[in-house]
Amino acid sequence: MIGRRAFLGTGAFFALVGCSSKFKRYDGPEVTRILVFKDKRKMYLVHHDRALKSYDIDLGSAPVGDKTHEGDGRTPEGRYVIDRRNPNSDYHLSLGISYPNAADIAEARALGKDPGGDIFIHGRSRENRGKGPDWTAGCISVKDKEMEDIYAMVRLGTVIDIFP
């Protein structure tokens, strides 16, 4: 009898765990734009002229200044779009930013450098918790639970403006 109870209890536990998912649904207003203010370490999801959500963010390891080339530790500045989704990210979930654009490529080439790429909005993942602020290689990081909301709310093609 104890074996059966243990079996049923274990089954119920795994059924509940299975209900908890990093993939959420969002049925609210469309996110028409993302605004990132590097100096304030804030990101806003916006519907036309109304902020829907705001988040504290971490940036690249060299947070001041525009990204000029691969490995500089900076987060790019300018207008981009969300161009890809990664549900299997090493950083919980991630949304790709369309860096580099033509101007970024020209700037890096003028310096004799590669512009780099793979700039994302992403979570922290376990090994990056407690690292403190501005630990990424140029990405924008939020808490994992916040990234779940962002991932549900933001669609491909959404404009992202990143300000100094």
Image: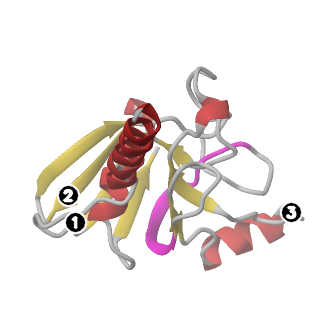
**Which residue sits at x=86%, y=63%?**
113
**Which residue sits at x=63%, y=40%?**
60
Left or right: where 116 falls relative to 65: right
Identify the residue at the far right of this view. 112
Q: Give the range drawn in magenta.
A: 73-85
Q: Quadrant of the N terminus?
A: top left
Above or below 41: residue 78 = below
In the foreground, 91 or 97: 91
Q: Which label belongs to residue 31?
A: 1
State the residue position of label 3. 113
Q: Which circle's residue, 2 or 3, is located before the other in the chain?
A: 2
Left or right: where 71 falls relative to 149: right
Question: Was residue 39 drawn as part of the magenta stretch in this picture?
Answer: no
In the foreground, 74 or 124: 124
Q: Which amino acid does label 3 sit on?
A: Lys
Percent position (x, y) of residue 136? 65, 40
Q: Nearer the viewer, mark 2 or mark 3?
A: 2
Q: Tell me the crowding category of disc 2: few under 14, some 14 to 19, or many 20 or more residues within 10 angstroms, Cα based.
A: some
Quarter-wise, where is residue 88 in the image?
bottom right
In the foreground, 21 or 137: 21
Q: Which amino acid does label 2 sit on?
A: Val
